[in-house]
Amino acid sequence: MINIMKDCKILDLYNLDETIAKEIFNGCTYPWEVLPKIKDFILELGNSLDTQEYEKIGENVWISKSAKVAPTAYILGPTIIGKDTEIRHCAFIRGNAIIGNNCVVGNSTELKNVILFNNVQVPHYNYVGDSILGYHSHMGAGSITSNVKSDKKLVIIKNGEEKLETGLKKVGAMIGDNVEIGCGSVLNPGSIIGKNSNIYPLSCVRGVILPNHIYKKQGEIVSKILS
């Protein structure tokens, strides 16, 4: 039987040295446990940031002085935007967002209650809500995280017969390091995508995808051949 308890743990999904938010994970086992903590964590962290590196803009928005932010982007606090990150035309950041270094948040992309590790790209028409994206992960154009079930019940992480209750109504996707999400894909509430995995374009994903796998379609998930 697949060990869902292991495959969903924070340390199996993420290199915590690749986020300014490393300390938010202290005392947590599973990544969705930090989702309710993001707002307060940003407020505490933001007020401690080096003013030589970060500038506070408006109400509780901290932006690295090396970041590039398009004048048409709309940013609500609390939000932190890291070094050398690019926020492009008409990006919509709805608050409770920690965006790492060297990230791209692109045209018409919407973020809400998220942690983006360093080098994450969400560059074209993406919706990312109540989700955590690991180091060097990339969401192709039009791919989204769905964060609320159609029946509005609490989200449960499922892998076959195994289940983990989150206790939360809103949980998007927990995307591990170096994951590639194909264009036009939908990650259903509570999807877990393991490190180094790929999701084919136009996929509808639910449940747990193990690390180092390729999701081609439902029922067809193959292991990568690692050299």
Image (cartoon, helix red, strand yellow):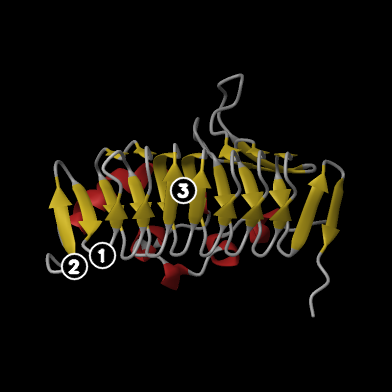
Q: Which mark is residue 179?
A: none
Name the residue that disc number 2 marks. 53
Confirm or deny contact between disc 2 and disc 1 (CB under 8 A).
Answer: yes
Quadrant assignment for the C terminus = bottom right
- Farthest residue, direction bottom: 227
Amino acid type indicated by mark 3:
Glu
Local packing at callout 2 (Cα closer than 10 Å; few below 14, some 14-19, many 20+) is: few
Local packing at callout 3 (Cα closer than 10 Å; few below 14, some 14-19, many 20+) is: some
Amino acid type indicated by mark 1:
Ser
Mark in the foreground, 3 or 2? 2
Name the residue that disc number 1 marks. 66
For the image, the number of numbered tags is 3
Name the spot of residue 123 as percent of width and height, x first. 49, 49
**Measuring 85% from the left and 58% from the top, which residue is drawn there?**
222
Kind of element beneath mark 2: loop
Confirm or deny contact between disc 1 and disc 3 (CB under 8 A).
Answer: no
Amino acid type indicated by mark 2:
Glu
Name the spot of residue 117 as percent of width and height, x first. 44, 60
Q: Which mark is residue 33?
A: 3
Mark in the foreground, 1 or 3? 1
As measured in the structure, the alpha-carbon distance from the residue carrying label 3 to the one carrying label 2 is 30 Å
Kind of element beneath mark 1: loop
**Measuring 18% from the left and 67% from the top, which residue is drawn there?**
53
Name the spot of residue 181 as percent of width and height, x first. 65, 50
Local packing at callout 1 (Cα closer than 10 Å; few below 14, some 14-19, many 20+) is: some
**Measuring 64% from the left and 44% from the top, which residue is drawn there?**
191
Quadrant assignment for the N terminus = bottom right
Kind of element beneath mark 3: helix
As measured in the structure, the alpha-carbon distance from the residue carrying label 2 to the one carrying label 1 is 8 Å
| Rendered image quadrant of residue 58 | top left
